[in-house]
Image (spheres, grey):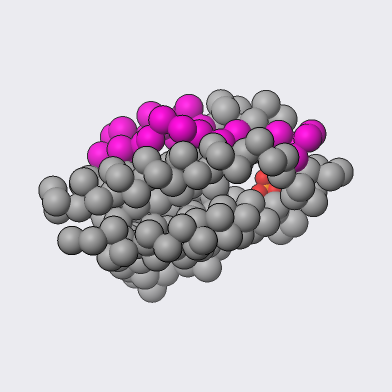
């Protein structure tokens, strides 16, 4: 197994109109693609049009497609935004819609909010533990006040770059190690 075989999904945690998560996800992907150590792709929860868990018979094609996408990935970077001191409902719903497809994989978290989205990130860590996803220590935390203009246009401070690199180093190492368990 080589690191080049690893597939890492950069999951956009927000789905609302006007969301800033695509800007953050593309920034992480731009840094990741330059590494040449894995295949990185943006995974947009909104594309799967997941229903609210338990409100349908589960036959929507997006549910199977979501599980198939997660199955195909070896690790994740969650772009996590803070909503009411936690993760978005959309991300929690998407997390709940799969089980085995998450197991024995690694993840990093890039969060944002007024306090760096740290409360959302810590909640996400608890959920990932239940899903057998190994979340790495390094956690880039972006401020809505200093890393965005008018809280909408993403202009990340340079200081985050080494953190993103260190987070990806850990995600790649653990994704490769955990692949041997599956
Ligand atoms: C319903 C809602 C609740 C929010 N609650 C918080 C919060 O508790 N703490 C915080 O730092 N930001 C909070 N915000 C601000 C969001 O972090 C900010 O709008 C961010 O851009 C959301 O990510 P998105 O643009 O990708 O949806 C909240 C935003 C929304 C829509």
- Name the spot of residue 21 as percent of width and height, x first: 64, 52
Apparent side of residue 165 relative to residue 144 in the rendered image (left or right): left
> Could you say which is closer to the camera, residue 54 or residue 142?
142
Asked if residue 136 is among those painted magenta in the image, a careful observer would answer yes
Q: Is residue 146 above or below residue 53?
A: above
Ligand 1 image position (quadrant): top right
Q: Is residue 74 above or below residue 174?
A: below
Apparent side of residue 82 relative to residue 150 in the rendered image (left or right): left
Q: Is residue 128 above or below residue 33?
A: above
- Name the spot of residue 180 as percent of width and height, x first: 14, 51
For residue 134, which quarter of the picture?
top left
For residue 101, which quarter of the picture?
bottom left
Apparent side of residue 99 relative to residue 48 in the rendered image (left or right): left
Asked if residue 139 is among those painted magenta in the image, a careful observer would answer yes
- Name the spot of residue 80 as percent of width and height, x first: 55, 42
Residue most toward the right?
150
* Residue lying at 52% horizontally and 68% vertically, measured from the top left: 47
In the image, the segment drawn in magenta is: 121-147
> Could you say which is closer to the camera, residue 135 or residue 49?
135
């Amino acid at each position: 197994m080589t690191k080049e075989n690893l597939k890492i999904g950069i999951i956009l945690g927000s789905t609302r109109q006007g969301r800033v998560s695509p800007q953050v996800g593309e920034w992480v992907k731009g840094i990741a693609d330059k590494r040449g150590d894995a295949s990185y792709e943006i995974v947009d929860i909104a594309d799967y049009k997941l229903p609210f868990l338990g409100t349908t018979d589960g036959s929507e094609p997006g549910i199977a497609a979501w599980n198939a996408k997660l199955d195909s990935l070896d690790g994740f970077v969650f772009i996590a935004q803070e909503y009411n001191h936690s993760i978005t409902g959309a991300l929690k719903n998407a997390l709940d819609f799969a089980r085995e497809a998450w197991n024995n994989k690694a993840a990093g978290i890039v969060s944002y909010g007024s306090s760096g989205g740290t409360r959302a990130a810590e909640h996400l860590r608890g959920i990932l533990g239940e899903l057998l996803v190994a979340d790495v220590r390094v956690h880039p935390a972006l401020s809505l006040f200093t890393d965005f203009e008018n809280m909408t246009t993403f202009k990340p401070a340079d200081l985050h770059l080494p953190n993103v690199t260190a987070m990806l180093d850990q995600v790649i190492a653990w994704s490769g190690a955990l692949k041997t368990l599956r």
